[in-house]
Every structure is written in C-alpha cells, then in structure tokens.
Amino acid sequence: MTDHELAARLATEAGELLLKVREEFADADAKDRKAAGDKRSHDFLMAALAEHRPGDAVLSEEGADDLIRLTSERVWIVDPLDGTREFSELGRTDWAVHVALWEGGELVAGAVALPAQGVTLATPTVAVRDALGGVLVEMGSAGAKVASVVQGISDVYVHAGGQYEWDSAAPVAVARAAGLFTSRIDGSPLVYNQSDVSLPDLIVCRPELADAVLTVTKLE
C-alpha cells in the first residue's frame, strides 16, 4: 500500500468510526460526543500507523508531542477530528479527519475525509471542478474549508486566527496535489514538522488569484 493509499484509507476509516460514535452518542451531552470522537479516532489512527508504518513518527493533535519527530525522516501529521464543535452538533457535515505525511522537509501525501458528506480528498490526484463565483461560504473545520476550494465550491480560503500544524497539513497536501496555491498570509512558504507547532495563518486559492489575495493579506 502506498503512502497516498494509506492516508486515504486511514482518513476514511477514521471517519467511518466517527460516524458510528456520533450515532452511539446521539442522545449524550455534546461535550461527551466531542471527547469520545477525539479519543476513538486518535486511538484508531495511532494503532493503524504503528501497524502499517512502525518506523515513522507521528504528530497528533490529541497525543503527547514526541520530539523524536524533529530528527525523523518521516512524520505523519494527523488531526483525528477537525471541527469538534461541528461534529458535536448533530446534522452538521462540515467536520473532517486529516492524515498527512511529511518527509524530507515536504508534505508528500495527505487525505482529508469529510465523513458526513461521504467524501475523501487525497493525493496524488484530485479532480477539481471549475471554480464558482465569489460567494462567502460559512463552514466549520479547516479541512472542510480547504476542501471547498479543492472541489471548486469556493475560490479562496484565508485564515489568520491561529492554527497548528495538524489543522492544515493534510488539507495543504491535498490542495497542492490539486494544483492550488498555498502559503502564509505574507506569502512565505508553509513549513511543517517544526519544534513550535503553531502555524497561525494560511492561504489556499486558485493560482491565478494568488497575487490579488496576497496584495490584500500583506497589508493586514
């Protein structure tokens, strides 16, 4: 199984697990639904990566940060449940599972599963529809927002409110595979597997819009 296939498989299977958790905790308090979703998806991904890629390091939002990753050649960066609030609100579909692989300084594989939509976007190839007009689309998780650009539903995603590596690694890997432009809001590259995992801002957009977007964001 290639890294691309593994990323897609794990993101999809974690998403299927989360759908079951959502159903199981349908009558529970929202905070219990969030906690169960985070834990079960994290535990599943950690066990699966240990089985399929035992020599690789892992950085997960829900796990302790093992700094051995800083000297590892290969690091999986995962967000077991991106959009916990949206997940906890029954009926919402704008939450995701992120699985990305960093190797040799670059994101080389990634998948974003949108379980409630029955969609998984993954490298190396992603079908991109013609982009629609400039309409503001409100949605929850970073994965869902980037997916909307990849799918041609939105033209641009700009975030400047604070994030971490696991929030954007898989979405950015998928966006790059789709031929989209990605950067920090000042135009500098998005760099992963750093000692400080804060990565507070990013841009994902169609390449032809990048200059116009950066003209605005660099002034902020």
Image (cartoon, grey):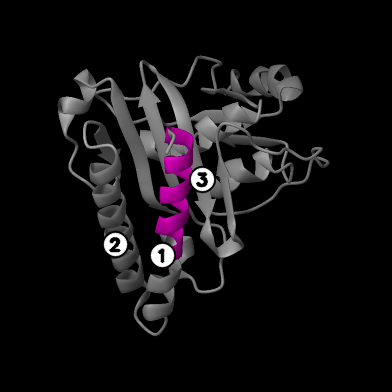
Marks 1/3 in contact by CB < 8 Å: the verdict is no
Nearest the viewer among 195 and 17 is 17
Q: Disc 3 marks which residue?
A: 112
Give the label on residue 18, or none.
1
Residue extending furthest toward the bottom: 27
Nearest the viewer among 51 and 144 is 51
Q: Choose the circle earlier in sequence order: 2 or 1.
A: 1
Marks 2/1 in contact by CB < 8 Å: the verdict is yes
Cα gap from disc 2 to disc 1, whole angstroms? 8 Å
Identify the main secondary structure in magenta. Answer: helix
Under mark 3, the amino acid is Val
Q: Disc 2 marks which residue?
A: 40
**Residue, x 36% and y 16% (percent of image)?**
104
- Quadrant showing the C terminus: top right
**Residue, x 39% and y 31% (percent of image)?**
101
User: Is 66 left or right of 13, judged from the image as shown?
Assistant: left
Magenta-colored span: 3-18
